Image: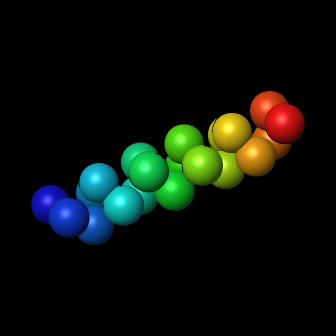
């Protein structure tokens, strides 16, 4: 379950990086 959270968190960070 922790891996899933890390996955969505990493995806969110990548999306934020792309947005900037």
- Residue sticking out furthest to the left: 1
16 is higher (above) or lower (below) than 6: above
Count how many numbered circles sit on residues in the image: 0
* Quadrant (top left, top right, bottom left, bottom right) of the N terminus: bottom left
* Quadrant (top left, top right, bottom left, bottom right) of the C terminus: top right
Rendered residue at 36%/61% (across/down) = 6
Rendered residue at 20%/64% (across/down) = 2
Rendered residue at 41%/58% (across/down) = 7
Q: How is the image coloured?
A: rainbow
Residue 11 percent location from the top left of the image: 55, 49
Quarter of the rendering containing residue 3? bottom left
Rendered residue at 80%/41% (across/down) = 18
Residue 13 percent location from the top left of the image: 60, 49
5 is higher (above) or lower (below) than 18: below
In this image, 3 relative to 8: left or right? left
2 is higher (above) or lower (below) than 16: below
């Amino acid at each position: 379950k922790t891996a899933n959270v890390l996955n969505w968190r990493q995806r969110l960070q990548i999306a934020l990086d792309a947005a900037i």
